[in-house]
Each structure stands twice: as C-alpha cells, then as structure tokens.
Image: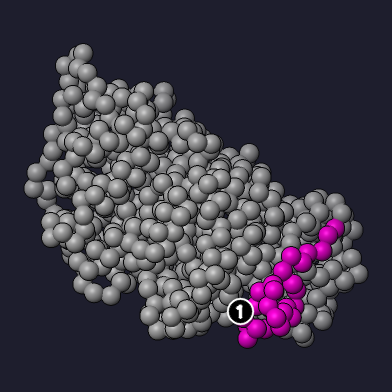
Amino acid sequence: MAQHRPRPSGRPRRTPHGRGVVAALATVTLAAGLLGSVPSGATAPPTGASAGATGVRLAEAGAELLPYQDATLPTRRRVRDLLGRMTLAEKIGQMAQAERADVAADPTTITELGLGSVLSGGGSVPTPNTAEAWADTVDRFQQAALETRLGIPLIYGVDAVHGHGNLLGATVFPHNIGLGATRNPALLEEIGHITAIETRASGPQWNFAPCLCVARDDRWGRTYESFGEDPRLVESLATVIDGLQGEPGQLDQPDRVLATAKHFAGDGLTDWDTGEGDYTLDQGISRVNRREFRRLALSPYPAAIDRHHVGSVMPSFSSVDWTEDGIGNPLKMHAHEELLTDVLKGEMGFEGFVISDWRAIHQIPGDLATQVTASVNAGVDMFMEPGSGTEPAFRELITTLTQVVEDGRVTEERIDDAVSRILTAKFELGLFEKPLTDRSLIDTIGSPAHRAVARDAVAQSQVLLRNEGRTLPLSSHESRVYVAGSNADNIGNQAGGWTLTWQGGSSNVIPGDTVLDAIEAQATRPVTFSEDASARVPRGADGVVVVGETPYAEGFGDVGGPEWAYDPADNGVPRPEQTMRLSAADQEAVRTVCDRAATCTVLVVSGRPMVIEPDLLRRIDALVASWLPGSEGRGVSDVLFGRKPFTGRLPVSWPRSVEQEPINVGDADYDPLFRYGFGRRTRP
C-alpha cells in the first residue's frame, strides 16, 4: 500500500443528510451478537451502556430472523438474500473504503454513506496508541455501520506487514527479506498466526499482507517487503497466509484475520527510471513478455489462491507494457482487465475480492468517471479512497460510481459481483454475529511467548557471509567487546519502515532490544560502545560494527528517489539519501575498529544488500547480513555468541556494486559478491 504526505487535520466534516433506521426484524440477532461480543472483564467501548448506544434497536421478542441473519445457513444463501435486499446506493457504499482520519471526528459519515470499510494507513493511529484504544476506535466505527438500514458491519484493514507494526507494544518481526533468509515455511505460518492474534485482538479484522512480490532490482525501495528474488522461494513462504487466516472455516475465530496477497502483479519487476512521479522504480513499468511475466510475477499467486485460500488481493501501482506488441503502451494494473479478471478471477479461480491500493485509480489516465469505470470493469471490487483536499475522495467515488452505473458504463451485474465478494468475506469473518472486537486475547499482544518466536526468527534470518579465522561465534567469556556503528543502538533503524509510521524513523522507539542491548546482555565481560568509534579500543577486544540504512518505505526508499522529511520527528529535515552504500561515518567506523580490534565483525542492518567496497572487505573478519530484525535484537546476539547456529541463506544476490543492479541468479553474466542462497554455517 502507498500513502501520500500527511495532510492537515481538523478540516470541516460534512453533516449527514439522513440516517437509515435499523429494520425491526434485523435487530434481534445483531443485538445478541453485540451484547455478547465483549468478553467479561474487557473494557467496553466508551459509548454508553444501553443497546441503543451500540446502534441497535431491540425488536419485539420472537421476531424471525431474515435469511442473511441466520448463521446456520450457507454463506452463499446469506449473501444472495442480503444482496437482494440492497439498493444500488447500499451496494456502492460497500465498495468504498475511507481512512480512519476521515471519519474519526464524525463516524456518522459511515452510517450516512453505508461505507463498507475503514483502514488505518501507516502511522494513522488512535490517541493513545494502545491496543484498547485501537479496539475502542474500531468498535465505534462498527457501531456506526450497524446503524444502517440493513445493519451491515464494516471490515477494518491495516498494514501489519511485519507484525502489527502500527500498534505501539506489538511484536515486531523481521521484515520479509529476513524471513526469506530463514527458508522456513513453518516459521512463517507461526509468525502469521501471532500477527493475526495481535491484530484482531486490537480491532482490525483484515491485514494488507503478505507481499508476494519477487524483487528483481535491489535499488527498489520495497525490496525488504519481498521474500526474495526467486519466485519459488516467494511461493514457498506464502504459508504466512495460513497463519493469518487459519484453515477454511476459521476466519471467524478471534485469532484470525483476512489476508491480502499483494501487489498483483509485477511490482518487483519494474524497469529503472520508469517510476511514478519522482520515484525511480516504485509504481513503474514492467516491460516484459507474457511468458516472463508469468514466471517472475504471477507464479506465486496460484498457490496463494488454491493452497492457502487467500481472501483478498491488492493490485500493484505498477504498469505492464507487453513486449509482444512493442514498447510504448503501458497499462496500469488497476485498469488491467486481462490480468485482474481473465487471469486472476478467471484462470486462477480467485473467489475473494480485489481491494485497490491507496488512491491508485487516480493514476489511470482520464477524468474520475473514466478512472472508476476502467478500474471496476477491470475487476477492482473495493476502492481505497482516503480523503484528499476538502472533498473526501470516498464521497467522490460513491457519486461517480453511481453515475457511471446509471449511465450504463458499468453494469449492475458487475456491481453485484463485487458486493457479493465483499459480503462473503464479512460473513466468513463472523462479523454479522460478533461485529465488535473480541478482546479475549488482548493481553497476549507483545507477550514474552510472541517475542520469543520473533527472537528465533531473527536468529534464523542472520546470514553469515564471511568468517575468516572462525571469528564467529564470539566467546561471551574470554574477550572484551567493543561495539560501534550507527545501527548498533537504534531500534528505529533496526525495525525499518512500516513501524509506528509509514516510513518508519530513526527516532521511533518500540519495546524491544537493540543489538547493543543484546550484546551487553550476553557478554559476561564489559562492553564498550562508541557509535563513531572515537573511544579507545581496548587491547585484545573483539570489535562489532553495526552499520546499514536508515528507515524508509515505498518510493522514498528507491535509490535515486526523493528524500523523506515528513514524520513529526523529522522536523522537515530530509533523511539521508538512499544509495545502497554505507555512509561515510559507518565506513570510517569499520576502518577504525577493524584496524585496532583483535577481531572485527560487521553486521549490516538494512532492507537490502549494501555495497561493501573491496578496501573495507579486506579489513573485515566476519560479515553478517542482519537485515531488519525488528524488536528482538537478542536474536542477533544469539548467533553472534553461538547460542544458536548461523543457518540463514541469502534470499537475494549480493552485488559488488550498485552498477551491477539488477543482478539475479540465472543471469548470463552472473558475478555477484555473494551468490543467491549463499550462507556460511556455524555450530552452536
């Protein structure tokens, strides 16, 4: 998912023109579900104690259930019955998704328009940023949805891409590139399950993850969201979907969420300097023939659909320009009927629903009516339309989609197909029976048990690239340890993007341990820390230099792309340019420590390979790709000191220079510094 720069808050909100009344026959089961959905002892939403405060008016006793309210009936029948009762306005409302900030001041907008969904973008959080406040927020919006004529609940989405990273206190796992290094499908499923538990216990029932992109150019700022450069590796780790959703029929459980396979398709395949706007790669153009596109972009999706039953798919911002008919006529994925309808829904048999990316349809050429018509006819079912300017984009979407249906440019049959898919997911999530947050697992968020799994994932993700003289593992008893480098004691850098804010931040602080914390906890002799290596290196000390990147996310992480300066802590100052090269300060720290310490280990904390110049590499005894480990720095020290063995293998090729990019296994002139799949081993 992409986002734009923060916009001022506090803009005027529209007053609703009229609100539907919950039908008398529709209220009995909803009231029972609402009153029974908050576990004993949990904090109830701050909206009053009466059933009326939840937006449900109790009907007379003994009223019969309508078919769509009857949980004993098959989902298909319930969908068919509810769809038959809906007006065109109610159907189109289900296809619209607003952002939290757009409706927080006035949730009655949800009731007025019958919105089908709300999301939190990266960094869009309640105040305070606690699990309870999240659940209260989601439930307040849900109550507004239940005030509609038919009482259709909404679905709330969030980017929990490496754990529920928007929530302060959630378990923050390694980003996907590190998980790709583990080569461990069972671990991925366990991580998915923990992420689902922590996400749903705090309110959201829908996760915009996993990313099944195949990163083919490491200059791309989303490389760390990919499991690797080989589509077979990506396909093998789609087991995270099973952890998120559970087995078929388990979506209504309090430890499961709807998953999203993204970005369909080819976002990791875009060509250099074709990016949208001032991006160099992100949202760009994949110039490729259909055969290669199937191999490098589409191949992870059949398994995600057939084997893992993923419930939703998000198209890519990128375009495809088929080479069979020559270069020069790219088509945006959000308007690509061949791929979204013929291939995804037809050939692959995808029965879930397609959610657009953040205002992505506005990149389609033409006016809004043309954009909406092209995207819905291509196969988009729900539209992520956060506010923009004075007129909320979701209002404009609803007005425009209504008009193009009335004009005959979009058929009601297509609308019915889209809404049926959305309603199916809501029924399977159990939202009609228990629309409010089940908080029974809220105390497990960030628990020691969950963090232990994250710590193990970190250990398995570490890739040992160089180990001269068997430098690693270090002895925790024999030597002093000297630690330096920009990423040794910065948990914000360690967690990367999509952590508390969209782009992440060096100043962001989450519960957990930095690499320095972890080294200090495991070393029995004194540890000296000097970020710039200006302090004296003790005689005979083992040196550990932790270098790498500062946080970024899509677009702003592209090499040669724009520089981010818009997180509150940035104070308008642009972050360092992303270059895939170590900063001058980190290079100097490596030279200093490696020249003076008895042994020199360099840990690279980054979202992709970093260029290690020959002059530096000659000085380094042990080199480790630590990726973006997240909250559990002790997973790094576990392998550093031999508590666990190094087992990770490179999920991407490590280039000798930035100029080698793109470089991938199988290239005719393949000559990386470290090949795909490489990783030295140690014994515990």
Amino acid type of disc 1?
Answer: Pro
Image coords of residue 417 (percent x, y): 29, 48
State the residue at coordinates (85%, 51%). 684
Height in image: 441 above or below 362? above
Which residues make up the magenta segment? 655-682
Choose between 99 and 264: the one closer to the eye: 264
The picture places residue 553, in percent across and down from the top left corner, at: 49, 67
Residue at 81% x, 80% y is 619
Q: Is residue 348 left or right of residue 465?
A: left
Q: Determine which quarter of the picture holds residue 108.
A: top left
Q: Quadrant of the N terminus?
A: bottom left
Tag 1: Cα neighbours inside 10 Å, few (<14), some, or many (≥20)? some
Rendering coords of residue 341 (x, y %): 38, 58
The residue furthest left is 17
Q: Is residue 680 located in the magenta-colored stretch of the structure?
A: yes
* Residue that appears at 31% across and 28% down: 34
The answer to whether residue 623 is seen in the rendering is yes
Residue 249 relative to residue 49: left or right: right
**Residue nearest the observer in this picture, 552 or 334:** 334
In the image, residue 50 above or below residue 140: above
**Residue occupying image coordinates x 91% and y 69%:** 469
Q: Is residue 605 magenta?
A: no
Residue for badge 1: 662
